Amino acid sequence: MTSDLQVPSGREVRRFTTATARRRGDAGIGTLLGDVYYAFVTAAIGIGVALGVVNTMREALPPPPAVPVAGPDLSVPSLAALVALGFVGVLLSLAGRLGPVGVGGAEATWWLSLPVDRRGLLRPVAIRLPLLAGAVSAVLLALLDQGLPAQAHPLGRALKVAVLGGLGAATLVLLAGVGQSLGAVRRRIATAGNILIGLVPVLALVGALAGWRLETVPAPAPALLVVIAFVVVGAAVALDRRLVRIPARDLRDSGSVASQAVGAVVSLDSRELGRALTDGAAPTRRRRASRFGWVRSADTALVAADLAVLRRSPRHMVQVVGAACVPAVVVGVHQLARPGVLAPVLIVAGYVAMVATAEGARRAEMAPVLDRLLPLSAKRVRVLRMIVPGAVMVVWSLAAFASVARLQGDLAGWLVLGVLSAPVWAGAAVRSAYRPSPDWSGPLVSTPAGALPVGIGSVLARGPDVVVLGLVPMLVAVVLGFVTTPVLLAQVATSAIVLAVGAHIQAPRKVSG
Amino acid sequence: MSATPVIRAADLVLGYGGEPVCAPVSFTLRAGRALGLVGPNGSGKSTVLRAVLGLIEPAGGSLRVLGREVDEREQSFRAQVSSVLDDDAYFPALTVAEHLMLTARGHGLTHPDDVVAGLLEDFGLTDHASVLPVALSSGQRRRLLLAAGFARPRVLLVLDEPEQRLDQGMRAVLADRLRAETAAGGAILLATHDPELLEAVATDAVLVGDDKSVRLRVADAARAIRAEPAR
């Protein structure tokens, strides 16, 4: 029932699909230009704000010490180099999770079964991710370099750094694609990236202790850029030739993750983004089933479930450990070891650790049936869901505030303050996990970044809001450089308030009439 | 009719993450025959189909489709093997007819308009030809997927529970089409929970199970489906 038929090329199939869809689309050239304008303005505003922040930070940094300081020390350029290394890890991790080559549901169903040359079908999606990674990396690396306290940052140097970042990132993603076509397990590529990210704080600590110092970050040599450009071209050609060797199952899996992630980004749903990036890389089967032998009640069942979720996610464990190392690294960099830097670092690192502890609550928010399985009130569920984040954040706080004490002295005082502030993180973790999703079906407001739902700000701020407010006493102590009894009492009060806010259940709105 | 079986599976071991999902499976499917895979939910029927389509790698045993190792990356494989799995994904801006046209043209049919018109008629989609998928019911979307399975040349047709979401009338139409398929020399491999469809279409059956996978007479396989415990 088959014969020698004139099968079209993959490119023709792709164009047929696009052209047919375009004929029906209601987006005219005006809409397209509007979207391009919004994207351009958003990117320009973002880069402008970031540039202002890094310039301010660079000018605020004190000069490096003229003579080596006693004790562990890491220079700012060394730290910048490690951050760049961490960024390479992020790229690898994302490339492994997103494919990098994949096709979404409709394309997988209707294109991959056709006997056409898949190269023509896949070429645009194979190019998209390296281009995006290159563009983002170029900007980020240039910003990072701009933040370094060098004598001068001429435009030529910034351009070279941007080119290095762009080409380097594109090379990595293209090589990950070649690996995918050679049968490399995507999860392993992602794990390699995760390990690299996890290595950064370890290397920073070891570097500070061992006295590894990079006095300046040299501008990339033109010859190096030329070599990397050749590598990019080579990797692109290799990937293009091997596109037909990527199995459909791999293309489907990658495409599914990428579609979910893009949907989450477009709808500003960070929880969905986390799920998209985590689920695809997680093993589908466990060697050992937990017997939950210590579970005696609904209360302990809930806590045991949260604990199992955390224990089975090495990525989240590494995230907590990495975040605990960050304050130690900052204290280890002589130029950064000051209260004005430490205060925001504690907030950001604590938030990163906190996010890792609330996966159970986030899952339950997505599937409310999980909470309804147990005979517990909604309020009690929320209180119980604070236990695991609270316990983990106590450990994080002990590590983080031990670093603060290394800078300021009074170890006992800082550790007590850390433990007293841990409930704030627990309350915020649950509040943020149970926040409602943005309501895209309601009215939208026009912003320079495009149309956004009314109230999106308050939705996205649920969680971070109580972190900032609840940690005011701790921040005051860090900025002042010492812990006092009134500060401890104030911290107890704000922690109690945040716990109450985290456990609060909003009463359903009554429908009038 | 070629002497080479369309599918030959011998002690095929399938699973995910190194764990088998069912006992080793063996069967042979020849041209002009229809083999039904039966078994309760989760027994591994769909996994067998996915292995035949090259969507999962067998962990052991041997599997040959059209006389060769399975490699869905080969264009010739995709040209000869048609499948309808449990996908429910569509191009949002393409109509029902355009989805079928894409399939027909993508396989190089010389008169795609005639083929598409015939399929729309057979699957009760003529009135919905210019409708976008978002406006279809779940049963109508299922009919669209099934129609696409016939909108192209094929030697082997692989169907995963094709009766899903179809009303009785459409199940009868499907059974007629599948009988015509085997009568014309085509081979069909289907997984099903519908004893009537199995008896109407299948010439052979295999019960896929955790402990053992055995070849059954079609009537016995239909009885096994009717005896499946509710889960």
Image (spheres, coloured by chain):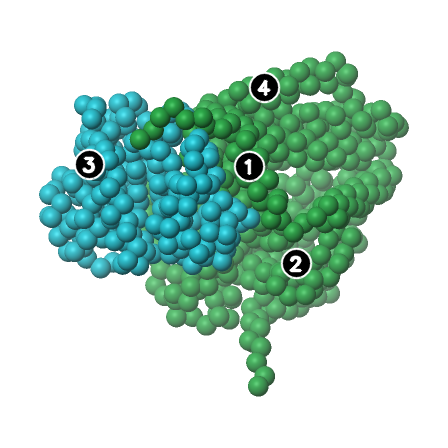
Q: Is residue B220 left or right of residue A454?
A: left
Viewer-side residue, B165 vs A242: B165
Q: Residues within 10 Å of mark 3 (few under 14, many from 20)?
A: many
Give coordinates of residue B100: x percent, y percent: 44, 43
The tag earlier along the polypeptide, 1 or 2, is: 1
Amino acid carrying mark 2 in the image: Leu
Give coordinates of residue A421: x percent, y percent: 64, 58
Q: Is disc 3 on the same chain as disc 4?
A: no
Amino acid carrying mark 4 in the image: Val
Q: In 3D space, how far apart are the residues under numbered discs 4 and 1 (Cα atoms)?
A: 25 Å
For mark 1, name the chain.
A
Mark toward the viewer: 1 or 2: 1
For mark 2, name the chain.
A
Viewer-side residue, A127 vs A323: A127
Task: Please give the residue where the numbered disc 1 appears in the rendered image.
Answer: A16
Give coordinates of residue B133: x percent, y percent: 48, 52
The tag earlier along the polypeptide, 4 or 1, is: 1
Task: Please give the residue where the numbered disc 4 appears in the rendered image.
Answer: A237
Task: Please give the residue where the numbered disc 3 appears in the rendered image.
Answer: B33
Q: Residues within 10 Å of mark 4 (few under 14, many from 20)?
A: few
For mark 4, name the chain.
A
Task: Please give the residue where the numbered disc 2 appears in the rendered image.
Answer: A460
Q: Colour of chain B?
A: cyan
